[in-house]
Image (spheres, helix red, strand yellow):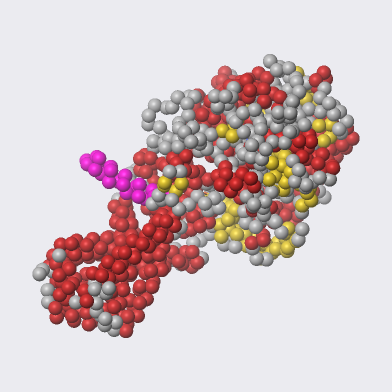
């Protein structure tokens, strides 16, 4: 198999040693079918065991390995050396604090995923223990694409509105909320809209669309958020008209 | 405590220079200046009409005739098409996907639909205005 | 928490955006024609006056102007934010006031145009 | 050291750990659950499972049939009381997931669809396209968010088990982001740390599957059961080892050798079935051990295809057509395209057997209970003897749920029943000893060995001695080699001295865990002198029920190779018989 020499320029930061991040160069002999993750693993195994980064599945499904590759938020296990120039810059995901090297702090987005109530809410009596809900394929199709999110957080790294204002709930969490709103088994939509259509919710999105462009799983959070804005606007009037005395 | 998460600064005023995607977005958002300008220009035209006098209207028309204005409108037209009309149509299926049975209608149909409506509507306006 | 009032302006913004995308190219083209001196038939005083005195004409124009104003106002608010102007309340009150003034003026002038 | 008191500590937030946590939160909301995981829950390797989860669904299927398939698939090494409970609870648990929002694929009438799987007599594998494990994991994770009694400790690396008077009392863990050590104390500890595929060089398993929980239990004196049974999945992508789910064959994909011949018919799995009309339990729908063994023979005969990544056979799915492939197997399609550049709609994909699953693990019973009171084990890290000598595909996702729930109930009851003052000071001393051990590793300042080097040697030695086919000479050599590597691994220097997210240190700890687990695999393979299920000996080619209808138990002996002991198999109604995968031949 052919070997291609790649210059990896990797952002390093050790809070115990460095004032600020800096770049370290590694020259990596890559096999032609390697992903950038393989190149990083080569560095870790052969050149520098101190490099810190997250990964696990190497099959685009665990969502650990999101990083900036030549400025673009990407999964390193899904970005192939064959599609890149000889010089590749790898940085931790933009818009997140850097914990160490390529590892970022995810507390904020984890809290946001939690905040949007991403679980089935039932107002009716709970379903019978041994009886499934029926759901037509069409009903499943409504939200199926939104279930594909692997929480890689590339979309947050791409979204400037999140970068500018960390209170914004942001693309993946909003898309997740929409996934449950659209699920025929769920009855929690109006509760959720109260959270999502509040100040830091959907309105903070100005439809930059970068989130959807970088999403490795084609979740299209941008679309979900726009649909939620429509839902939010409708719900607003519904609440206004339904409860005339209600000040909100 | 050994943790000291490093926060990369993000310029509040020039962040969009970071990549082409953001620049295109800013250009798109700035179509709002054009919308503002043309609505007020139209309101101004209405004001002249509201005088209910042909002279005032005609002098308004002639005040609008200059190479500067030609350049401005020409530029505005192209800018508006490329940064408002076309993107808006392109993004329409995202905001309002149409599902038929098990499949979502491919976005392209919705986009094409928009272009057709646009053509008809524009033709109607031109017809009203006596251009065609 | 509850749904923010932004829901109202956003609705206007979205409707206005759709409308401007459809009609503004034609509108700008008309101004372009006028600027070149080829004033179209329908823009001559008699014809345009007839059109704007009709109820249908008034209503159409008002809707276009009203939605465009609010569309522009809301987007300008976002643009200000994107350029780093962080006095959102001030910006919002300015742009929405402008839009309100524009709305009132449109209504007033349309009302004043009489046969 | 920070001290955290909980009622139940769960180590591992994959499918098993999350299911257990939810079960406790639902039935005992007053109990505080500490859920520790070395990665964020949704990164757990359950996300990689593609094919689906088994549970009787159709009217023409029965619990009896699921039982029989599982027991014969496991070559009668399953504990049959466990299997009985499992098949009975399976459908209920899968419906429960449905209620929690799992996006199962659907039939025309809106009910959940099921697909055929290897070794199963009927369609009974519930699936969500080819991302079943992913959806199960995310459904469980998201559902768990509504329970305030579950306290998560994400990216905490559990180091060792704390125990007193033979009773489990907690764990010590390292917070990755700060380098701080935490002492978790609890009356019940549930291990749900997943498998150990990374002890082999070529595996479908993710980087995190290093057998930590098995090693922790083993170091604490708990035996590891049936470690010689390592499942090879017949269809891994060469190079990366990425799995092409059994669903590919379930949907009708076929395996051919370099001459385009469907070679499985030569290995007692024939007659050849028509293209696109797979027959249950024959040819491509045979069990994984048999299919992987057939590859080994084809390779010996020179019938395999040479590729840049070594010898392969071809999986042909072209006759399924583009629409079916894209609808039912979209992930697999994308993976093959990205990693080996083959579009399965147009071309056959090269595949080869790849280490996939550990049937063995922490010795546990039907309640997830282990020989150490207060310690429970569930999921792939456990060996509750559902899977016997060979796991049937799609049984393990269901296993996570069924026994996750049951062990949670047992652990909760145990936690409630314990009273009296905790002897905290003794535990603190133990915890401090663990911390001292880790600090010692960090202080070591010159070493000739490298983590990657020893890991490679370990993996290739295990592959050579305890691969698809084994013999005395090979296993013995591997046992010796591993003992040597245990020694040499003490000469590794951790170059990274930082407290913050020290993955170098983590790598060393994982290597030590893997070495412990690998030794048990090799030693147990050496001890079992028969062929059964996934354990095939060239020097003892027959199954020997007389001597070896028994579980092996590997015990740690300080400074020596593991000691192997034996435990009877529980048999309720199915006496050992012949595993028949010849379809309609007879
Ligand atoms: C590619 C692939 C496909 C598969 N497909 C199927 C299928 O179709 N059907 C089926 O039934 N089975 C399938 N399996 C098997 C099945 O997915 C696994 O056996 C199962 O998911 C294991 O789940 P678990 O909860 O035991 O462990 P995991 O999901 O691996 O979780 C382990 C957890 O333990 C934590 N952990 C580990 N060590 C430590 C430590 N030291 N400290 C703290 N936390 C720790 C991890 O962070 C993680 O949260 C597949 C397996 C693979 C690899
Ligand atoms: S929406 Fe896409 S980019 Fe964002 S976290 Fe999910 S998978 Fe990643
Ligand atoms: S990039 Fe950000 S602004 Fe909206 S469309 Fe996506 S969330
Ligand atoms: S390593 Fe799992 S997504 Fe890349």
**A76 to the left or right of D289:** left
User: In the picture, residue A164 is in which quadrant?
Assistant: bottom left
Where residue C66 sits in the image (x, y, percent)?
A: 24, 61
Q: Nearer the viewer, residue A198 or B62?
A: B62
Does the stretch in magenta take in A236?
A: yes
Which segment did they paint magenta?
A224-246
Where residue C79 sits in the image (x, y, percent)?
A: 37, 64
Where residue D315 sits in the image (x, y, percent)?
A: 70, 45
**Residue found at x 57% / y 44%:** D324
Main SS, magenta region, reads helix
**Residue found at x 56% / y 57%:** A73
**Residue found at x 46% / y 46%:** B103
If the image is split into quadrants, where does the C terminus of chain A sit?
top left
Does the stretch in magenta take in A32?
A: no
User: In the picture, residue D221 is in which quadrant?
Assistant: top right
Q: Is residue D218 visible?
A: no
**D47 to the left or right of D259:** left
Residue C69 to residue A57: above or below:
below
Where residue B61 sits in the image (x, y, percent)?
A: 22, 79
**Residue found at x 78% / y 21%:** D549
Q: Residue furthest right?
A: D473
């Amino acid at each position: 198999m052919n070997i291609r020499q790649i210059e990896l320029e990797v952002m390093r930061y050790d809070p115990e040693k460095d004032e600020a991040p800096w770049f370290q160069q590694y020259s990596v002999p890559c096999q032609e079918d390697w992903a950038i993750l393989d190149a990083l693993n080569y560095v870790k195994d052969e050149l520098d065991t101190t490099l810190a980064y997250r990964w696990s599945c190497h099959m685009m499904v665990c969502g650990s390995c999101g990083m900036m590759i030549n400025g673009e938020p990407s999964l390193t296990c899904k970005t192939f050396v064959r599609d890149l120039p000889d010089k590749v810059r790898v940085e931790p995901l933009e818009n997140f604090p850097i914990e160490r090297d390529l590892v970022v702090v995810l507390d904020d987005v984890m809290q946001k995923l939690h905040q949007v109530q991403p679980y089935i809410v039932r107002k009716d009596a709970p379903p019978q223990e041994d009886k499934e809900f029926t759901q037509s394929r069409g009903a499943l199709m409504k939200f199926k694409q939104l279930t594909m999110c692997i929480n890689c957080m590339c979309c947050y790294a791409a979204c400037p509105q999140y970068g500018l204002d960390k209170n914004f709930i942001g693309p993946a969490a909003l898309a997740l909320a929409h996934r449950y709103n659209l699920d025929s088994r769920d009855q929690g939509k109006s509760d959720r809209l109260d959270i999502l259509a509040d100040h830091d919710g959907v309105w903070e999105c100005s439809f930059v669309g970068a989130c959807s462009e970088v999403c490795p799983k084609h979740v299209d959070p941008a679309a979900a958020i726009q649909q939620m804005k429509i839902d939010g606007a409708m719900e607003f009037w519904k609440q206004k008209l339904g409860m005339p005395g209600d000040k909100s | 405590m050994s943790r000291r998460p490093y926060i990369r600064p993000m310029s509040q005023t020039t962040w969009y220079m970071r990549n082409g995607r953001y620049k295109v977005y800013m250009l798109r958002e700035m179509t709002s200046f054009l919308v503002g300008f043309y609505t007020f220009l139209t309101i101004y035209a209405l004001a002249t009409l509201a005088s209910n006098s042909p002279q005032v209207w005609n002098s308004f028309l002639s005040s609008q005739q200059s190479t500067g204005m030609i350049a401005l409108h020409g530029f505005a037209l192209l800018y508006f098409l490329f940064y408002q009309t076309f993107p808006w149509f392109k993004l329409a299926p995202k905001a309002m996907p149409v599902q038929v049975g098990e499949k979502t209608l491919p976005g392209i149909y919705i986009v094409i639909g928009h272009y057709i409506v646009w053509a008809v509507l524009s033709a109607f306006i031109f017809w009203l205005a006596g251009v065609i | 928490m509850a749904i923010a009032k932004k829901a109202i302006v956003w609705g206007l913004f979205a409707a206005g955006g759709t409308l401007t995308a459809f009609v503004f190219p034609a509108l700008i083209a008309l101004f372009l024609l006028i600027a070149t001196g080829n004033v179209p038939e329908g823009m001559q005083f008699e014809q345009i006056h007839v059109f704007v005195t009709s109820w249908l004409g008034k209503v159409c124009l008002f809707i276009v102007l009203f939605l465009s104003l609010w569309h522009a106002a809301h987007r300008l608010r976002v643009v200000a934010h994107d350029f780093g102007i962080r006095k959102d309340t001030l910006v919002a009150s300015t742009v929405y006031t402008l839009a309100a003034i524009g709305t009132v003026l449109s209504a007033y002038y349309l009302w004043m145009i009489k046969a | 050291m920070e001290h955290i008191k909980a009622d139940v500590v769960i180590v591992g937030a994959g499918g098993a750990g999350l299911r257990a946590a939810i079960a406790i939160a639902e039935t005992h909301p007053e109990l505080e659950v500490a859920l520790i995981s070395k990665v964020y829950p949704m990164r757990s390797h359950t996300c990689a499972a593609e094919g689906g989860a088994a549970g009787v669904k159709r009217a023409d299927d029965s619990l009896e049939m699921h039982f029989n398939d599982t027991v014969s698939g496991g070559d009668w090494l399953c504990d049959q009381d466990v299997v009985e409970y499992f098949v009975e609870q399976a459908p209920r648990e899968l419906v429960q997931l449905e209620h929690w929002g799992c996006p199962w694929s659907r039939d025309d009438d809106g009910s959940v669809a099921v697909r055929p799987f290897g070794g199963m007599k009927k369609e009974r594998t519930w699936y969500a396209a080819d991302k079943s494990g992913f959806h199960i994991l995310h459904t469980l994770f998201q559902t768990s968010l509504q329970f305030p009694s579950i306290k998560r400790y994400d990216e905490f690396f559990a180091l060792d088990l704390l125990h007193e008077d033979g009773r489990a009392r907690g764990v010590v863990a390292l917070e990755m982001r700060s380098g701080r050590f935490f002492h978790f104390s609890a009356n019940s500890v549930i291990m749900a740390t997943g498998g150990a595929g990374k002890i082999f060089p070529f595996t479908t398993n993710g980087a995190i599957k290093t057998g930590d929980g098995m090693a922790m239990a083993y170091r604490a004196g708990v035996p590891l059961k049936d470690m010689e049974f390592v499942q090879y999945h017949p269809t891994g992508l060469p190079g990366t080892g990425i799995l092409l789910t059994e669903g590919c064959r379930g949907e009708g994909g076929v395996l051919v050798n370099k001459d385009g011949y469907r070679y499985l018919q030569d290995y007692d799995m024939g007659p050849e079935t028509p293209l696109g009309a797979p027959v249950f339990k024959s040819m491509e729908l045979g069990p994984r051990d048999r299919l992987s063994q057939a590859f080994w023979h084809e390779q010996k005969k020179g019938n395999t295809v040479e590729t840049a990544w070594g010898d392969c056979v071809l999986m042909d799915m072209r006759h399924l057509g583009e629409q079916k492939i894209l609808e039912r197997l979209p992930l697999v399609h994308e993976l093959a395209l990205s990693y080996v550049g083959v579009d399965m709609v147009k071309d056959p994909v090269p595949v080869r057997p790849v280490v996939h699953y550990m049937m063995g693990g922490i010795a546990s019973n039907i309640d997830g209970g282990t020989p150490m009171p207060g310690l429970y084990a569930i999921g792939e890290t456990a060996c509750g003897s559902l899977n016997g000598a060979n796991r049937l595909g799609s049984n393990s996702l269901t296993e996570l749920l069924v026994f996750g729930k049951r062990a949670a109930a047992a652990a909760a009851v145990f936690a409630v029943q314990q009273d009296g003052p905790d002897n905290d000071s003794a535990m603190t001393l133990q915890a401090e000893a663990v911390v001292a051990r880790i600090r010692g590793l960090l202080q070591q300042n010159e070493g000739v060995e490298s983590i990657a080097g020893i890991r490679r040697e370990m993996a290739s030695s295990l592959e050579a001695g305890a691969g698809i086919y084994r013999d005395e000479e090979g296993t013995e050599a591997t046992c010796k080699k591993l003992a040597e590597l245990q020694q040499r691994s003490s000469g590794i220097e951790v170059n990274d001295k930082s407290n913050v997210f020290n993955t170098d240190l983590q790598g060393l700890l994982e290597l030590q865990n893997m070495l412990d687990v690998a030794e048990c695999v090799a030693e147990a393979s050496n001890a079992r002198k028969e062929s059964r299920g996934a354990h095939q000996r060239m020097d003892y080619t027959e199954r020997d029920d007389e001597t070896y209808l028994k579980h092996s138990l590997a015990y740690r002996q300080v400074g020596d190779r593991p000691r192997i002991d034996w435990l009877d198999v529980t048999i309720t109604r199915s006496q050992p018989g012949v595993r028949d995968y010849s379809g309609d031949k007879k």
